[in-house]
Amino acid sequence: MYKLGIDVGGTNTDAVLIDENLNVAAEVKVPTTEDIYTGILGAVREVLKMSDVNRADIRQAMLGTTQCTNAIVERKRLAPIGILRIGAPATLGVLPMADWEEELYGIAEGIAVTGGGSEYDGKELAAFDCEAAERFFREMKEKGVKSIAISQVFSTVRNDHELEAAKLCREVMGEEVHLSISSEIGSMGLIERENATILNAALWKVAEQFTEGFEKSLEEEGIVNADIYLSQNDGTLMTMEHARKYPILTVACGPTNSIRGASYLSRMKNAIVVDVGGTTTDFGVIQNGFPRESSVAVTIGGVRTNFRMPDVVSIGLGGGSIVREQKDGSVTVGPDSVGYQITEKAMVFGGDVMTATDIAVRLGMVKLGDDLRVKQIPRELAERAMETICGMVEDGIDAMKVSNEDCDVILAGGGSIVLPEKIRGTSCVVKPKHFGCANAIGSAISKVSGTFEKLMDYDVILREQAIEQAKAEAEELAVQAGALRETVEIIEIEDVPLAYYPGNTNRVKVKAAGDLQ
């Protein structure tokens, strides 16, 4: 039995085949194409050709893609939606999408704020205004809207009005309507949770396209026995159905795949991962084998959100980053890059653009292309460029540290050939075998997870009972997402006291993960 892992990056599309013992049978790296799927097909064909594996033996296929991220950042292919907030009269001061850019604001075909919601202590703020909600849903149906985002003030405490609105929406607009409910997506903070829900609602077409496209590309290559999964941004997998319902969870899955893959390849459970691609370098932290989550609101394409996201810092440094000597003698590296055109434009490949890869070849750090073509680069210039590269990486590592002590670092990604073996501020630097395809490997070996989060009053329910209840809920969510029940284990428990809430209120968060079914 084999697993096929694919990760689509901005520069390269990586594919790996992993056998039942989780050993790498074959790996390939091909340029990403503008239409994405041509690159995926090319990668699949190459890895099958290299491995000569029987297609019938491939039972699982995993895809990590930046399609949702790109759609938000580029403001393309986002579907028109309707937005219902349940929170009048308390939340009328700041309306939905109040601080969104005009280009993104246009996705809203209609916005309504109706009566309802709860206070921070769970008391009903106002009765749910069913009539106003029904009028809004009928208006959206007449406009041909297929996706609705529903948010409720303090839905993390009590979400009954959200669920009531969702039921009403299906009755009015039909069972085929795409519903995004804020209590299922974000955390505390109405605006940020609502923003994430709106983005999720707008991404349904994108999700439908890349899930169906991936499925079709596998069928074209005769891979018909494989269960298909999508990578999500906590370093685990979800089913196709889950991905179509929560496409926002695929955002930032690229860095998390690399973090997971680097951890697996190096056998290190706690370290900082430096993933160097063709255009950018991502810094992340592996804790107990899983990516560290961000504890602050994350901005995606200019929109503040608060759903679970990896704690990742990105800088404009990659193998294709353009190197320039300034008039004052300083050397800059990036942030612009030749990207997937590196094999045409880099000097070592016959081009005329000096890149970070050319610098590494000039200094003898790696053998690639025609090294005679970079002899014209003065060694002193190459050394100054490498100092700049090292400084950028050292600053990135320092940004991820929680103390001033030296830390272990794992290098991953094809672009990591431009980094030296010794980096200041580190205790050891590891570049494992198959480092170039760590992202695709991370996708292929990932587990399936479920995360449960709720505010609980320990004066009402004992702490031990609350955590046991949360653990059971998290395990059930993991099974629903596609995990094998007997392999599910709790990997993270967090309860944080909330001083500004009445009683002994705590935010309880539990994460469970298990092997694929």
Image (cartoon, grey):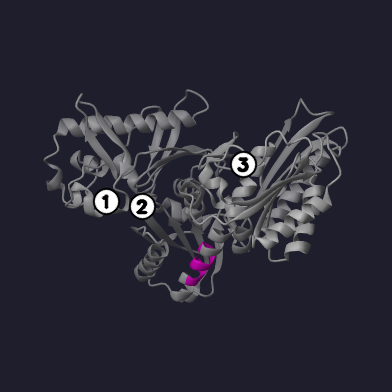
Amino acid found under the numbered disc labelled 1: Ile
Q: CA distance from mark 1 to mark 2?
A: 9 Å
Q: Is residue 261 visible?
A: no
Depth check: 128 or 32 in front? 128
Determine the main secondary structure of the stretch shown in magenta.
helix
* Disc 1 target residue: 342
Q: Over which residues does the magenta segment extend?
A: 210-216
Q: Nearer the viewer, mark 3 or mark 1?
A: 3
Dot 3: element: loop
Q: Residue at x 54, y 46 (%)?
A: 104
Dot 2: element: loop
Question: Which x, y percent locates residue 38?
Answer: 38, 66
Residue 387 badge: none
* Disc 3 target residue: 97
Q: Residue at x 46, y 29 (%)?
A: 399
User: Closer to the N terminus: mark 1 or mark 2?
Assistant: 2
Q: CA distance from mark 2 to mark 3?
A: 33 Å
Depth check: 327 or 383 in front? 327
- Considering only vertical position in the picture, is 503 above or below 75? above
Amino acid found under the numbered disc labelled 2: Thr
Q: CA distance from mark 3 to mark 1?
A: 39 Å
Dot 1: element: helix
Contact between marks 1 and 2 (CB within 8 A): the answer is yes
Question: Which x, y percent locates residue 179?
Answer: 69, 57
User: Closer to the N terminus: mark 3 or mark 1?
Assistant: 3
Residue 11 badge: 2
